[in-house]
Image (cartoon, rainbow, N blue to C red):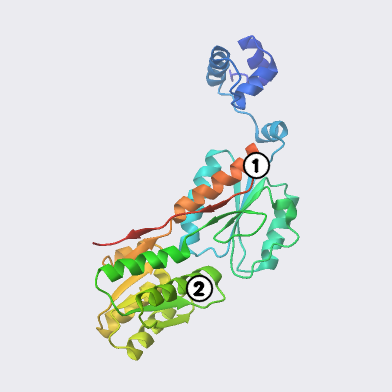
Amino acid sequence: MMKKRLTISDIARLAGVGTTTVSRVLNQDPKVKPETRHRVEQIIAEAGYAPSPSARAMRTQRQQVVGVIVSRLDSASEHQAVRAMLQVLEQAGYEVLLMESGFSSDKVAEHLNWLRLRQADGAILFAFSGLALDGQADWQDKLVVMARRYPGFSSVCYDDKGAIGLMLEHLWRQGVRRPAYVGVELRDSTTGQQRLEAYLDFCRAQDIAPHYRLGGLSHQAGLEAARLLLKEQADTDALVCASDTLALGAAKYLQQSGKAATLTGIGNNELLRFLFPAVASVDLGYPQAGTAAARQLLAQIEQGRPIAELALPCRLVSTD
């Protein structure tokens, strides 16, 4: 005969407590006496009791749903951050809805509106240059923005300028004196503008002439920039790339042309490490950023934590 599934009332009766006490145990209320908690939890374990999602939502006034809006689904860096987010959010009992903006503010607004209608508890948004969050004031206490700061919203940012500075200082100690820079167009405020500024600041500090090329974020853009830089200045002794994707393209050019130059990237990409293990890179902390964003969002949703701007440190990943 099938065993009858116990209700909260049944558990309360067997434990000799009220239904309110059982609910407090289920919600991890620290004020419940240890002996009472143990008795209730023992009965729950023996009965295999699990509250339904709808009942849990009624108790907490939350739907246990969080949206994650990435800029593009094929981004290696965003993929690393999302994997870390999912682990934190799913362990906390939240359903995660993954969406793609395609670098469109209109698409972001559409996704946020859909999440609003779905009564989602919060969202994590991967920002991009030109992103507008006008008219989204009702998301201020339940939204965390990745990679860029937005006044009035929590954010988790990478140390873009520090990453380039860290790499250049490393190269300088290795004897590099004519580093060229493979960068991204300036309309990208982080990977583009901030990382170029760090390169130019270093050149001024060391009193050396800057030599750089800016373009897209693809492997082909990295290859083409490396070709032009080494053609224009044959004594270039290092190519400092704004991303590991660009470094992969530059590495292919060096391999094909037979030319020699120290090559570095930013991002600590697994594919770059596998194909070209001698290439140094800077780890910006993508998984750590995903974890930090998920924890900040949960704290805002569940504990009323105020909005915060979080900045992650970077670290050099070198073969030395």
Q: Which mark is residue 89?
A: none
Reading the image, the residue beneath label 1 is: 301
At a point 68% along the width and 59% down the height, the residue shown is: 111
Q: Is residue 122 above or below residue 205?
A: above
Task: Name the side, left or right, on which 34 lies relative to 62.
Answer: left
| Mark 1 closeness class: few <14, some 14–19, many ≥20 residues within 10 Å | some
**Which sits in the foreground, 170 or 7?**
170
State the quadrant of the N terminus. top right
State the quadrant of the C terminus. bottom left
Give the residue type that dot 2 points to. Answer: Gly
Reading the image, the residue beneath label 2 is: 192
Task: Name the side, left or right, on which 221 lies relative to 22.
Answer: left
At a point 46% along the width and 66% down the height, the residue shown is: 161
| Mark 2 closeness class: few <14, some 14–19, many ≥20 residues within 10 Å | many
Asked whether the viewer can see residue 37, the reply is: yes
Q: Is residue 92 above or below residue 235?
A: above
Residues under labels 1 and 2: Cα distance? 33 Å
Q: Is residue 200 above or below residue 158?
A: below
Q: Measured from the top left, where is residue 103 in percent x and y?
A: 61, 69
SS label for mark 2: helix
**Which sits in the foreground, 64 or 175?**
175
Q: Quadrant of residue 268?
A: bottom left
Name of the residue lying farthest toward the top: 16
At a point 62% along the width and 27% down the height, the residue shown is: 27
Task: Name the side, left or right, on which 4 lies relative to 318.
Answer: right
At a point 55% along the width and 65% down the height, the residue shown is: 72
Q: Quadrant of residue 284?
A: bottom left
